[in-house]
Image: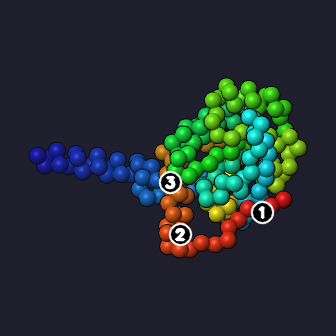
Amino acid sequence: MLMVASAFLTLSILAAQSSPSYLAGGDPYETLSVLRIQKKPAPDFSFPRVNGKSVKLSDDKGKVVLLGFFKTFWPNCRRELPTKEKLYRQFKDKDLAIFAVSFKEPEDLVKDFQKEFKLSFPVLFDPSGKVSEKYNITGHPTTFLIDRKGFLVGNVPGERDWSSPEAKALVIDLLAKWNKKFQSGSRSSGGFLLF
């Protein structure tokens, strides 16, 4: 009996040591290698989406936003966007918005890409590169985290698996932080830098 208890204790210790940090109350920003941004207003924009309707970023104030920049032909973008779709389907009714911004690509190519990957969140065109320039995009994919008040709070350069437990923990953390501040009456005027 003592041997069984000792083996159980050893397995418990090993499991705890090998558990991802997000399960142990770790920082989801560190787990996903998110670069924290000193809160600043997210540059606002309005662009057409694949279906022709216009989308304005500030229209989603009150939601947590993942704003991603991509190119249709880059393998890491082709792998990442389907994982954002999985995340979006799980959290879209819980105040998560996702936008994918195509950088200087033909509209028909982006439409085909959206159909191929069955992306239901807005896919936008940045034919001039204006939005990408405002966000200082230097590589694809790049994702920005925007809090419910319209402030940039994180930058995620490179590919991530947005359907992973770590990404879900990050989204839950962003949603929960704002809810606590909102419920305690701590409201500010909000972000979104118009240009």
Which residue, as the protein is rendered here, is positioned at the far left? 1
Q: Nearer the viewer, residue 111 or 167?
A: 111
Rendered image: mark on residue 193: 1
Q: Which residue is mark 3?
A: 172
Contact between labelled residues 2 and 3, with CB atoms less than 8 Å apart: no
Query: Marks 1/2: CA distance?
Result: 22 Å
**Three-letter residue code for mark 1:** Leu
Q: Residue furthest front?
A: 53
Viewer-nearest residue: 163 or 15: 163
Place of residue 2 in the rendered image (x, y in percent of width and height, measured from the top left): 13, 49
Name the front one of labels 1 and 3: 1
Q: Choose top left, top right, bottom left or bottom right for residue 49.
A: top right
Specify the farthest residue to the right: 128
Q: Residues within 10 Å of mark 3 (few under 14, many from 20)?
A: some
Q: Is residue 60 above or below residue 186?
A: above
Q: Position of residue 80 (x, y in %)?
A: 63, 37
